Each structure stands twice: as C-alpha cells, then as structure tokens.
Image (cartoon, rainbow, N blue to C red):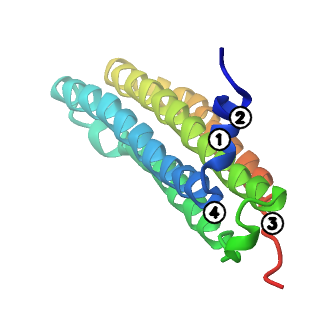
Amino acid sequence: MVTSSSSWSQALVQISPYTFAAVGIAISIGVSVLGAAWGIYITGSSLIGAAIKAPRITSKNLISVIFCEAVAIYGVIVAIILQTKLESVPSSKMYDAESLRAGYAIFASGIIVGFANLVCGLCVGIIGSSCALSDAQNSSLFVKILVIEIFGSALGLFGVIVGIIMSAQATWPSKV
C-alpha cells in the first residue's frame, strides 16, 4: 500500500524551485542548440551534395544554415531572460506556493522554448535541404521554397513568445 508521503506530488514539492528553474534554463538553451545543430546537419549535408552538381547554389543557400543558427540564438536569448527571473528567497519561504509557482513557471518556459526550437530546427533543416536540392535542379524554385522556410522559422519565434509569456508568472516571494 502506497502512503501519501511517497506519492509523486509529495516528491515534486520537496524538490527545490531553484532546481526546477535551473533545469528549465538548461533545457531552453540545450535543446535549442540541439535543434539548431540537427537542422544544420540536415541542410549542410544536402547543400554540400547538391553543390557538386551546381556550385552556384553554395553561397545563396547558406541562408538556410543561418535560419538554423537563429534557433540556437532564440534559446540563448530566452535562457538569459529566464536567468534574470531568478531571485534569492529566504530559506523559510523556499517551499511557499509562490516560490514553487515561480520555479515551475521558469521550468515550463524552458521546456516550451527548448522543444519548440528543436522542432523548428528540424523543420528549417528539412526545408533547407529541399531548397538546396531543388535549387540545384531549377534555380527559379529558390525564392518559393525560401518563403516556406521563413514560415518554418516562425515556429521558433512562437515558442519564444509563449516562453516569455509563461515566464511572466515567475514572481518570487518578498524577502521580508
């Protein structure tokens, strides 16, 4: 028989809100960089392969790599914003509801931004790969596919906006 003191909710409440906040910040930057790296890997390999047939595509298709790199920058920006939300709290108020809410808000914000940017990096990488391969075959397709790539890049911005809105809930108790 499981007692109430060993339930998951009790375990989560016993974890410091600063731990949740730190993990959220780490996820924000780490998973965003993973998404950017994955997108650059997908785009870059196709770009290098397609450039063998049509060397002219190399310089103009680097915009796809730049879009992927922007995903990592989104994660860094949000991590800096989340870091500024941290405040010291007296140990007597560490586990107050307001402290827990602030820690959870920063954690949720980091997860939202990290995974939105992971998906954005994959999306931009796959579209960038298609753009490079299509441009090697028919140069008139570049601008058309680039517009689609811009829409894919907007997914990361949506994650940043939602993350900033979520982090607004992070208010720590006063020190008095």
Q: Residue at 39% of width from left, 34% of height from top? A: 39
Disc 2: which residue: 9
Q: Can you say which quadrant of the picture contains the C terminus? A: bottom right
Choose mark 1 or mark 4, whichever is in front: 1
Q: To which residue does mark 4 refer?
A: 82
On the image, the x and y values in percent for residue 6 come to 63, 31
Q: State the mark number for residue 12.
A: 1
Residue 88 at x, y percent in the picture: 66, 77
Residue 171: which disc?
3
The crowding category of the residue bearing disc 2, from other C-alpha atoms within 10 Å (few below 14, some 14 to 19, many at least 20), is few
Label 2 sits on what residue type?
Answer: Ser
Q: Amino acid at mark 4?
A: Leu
Given residues 124 and 137, the one toward you in this image is 124
Tell which residue pokes out farthest to the top in this image: 1
Callout 1, which amino acid?
Answer: Leu
- CA gap, disc 2 to disc 1? 5 Å
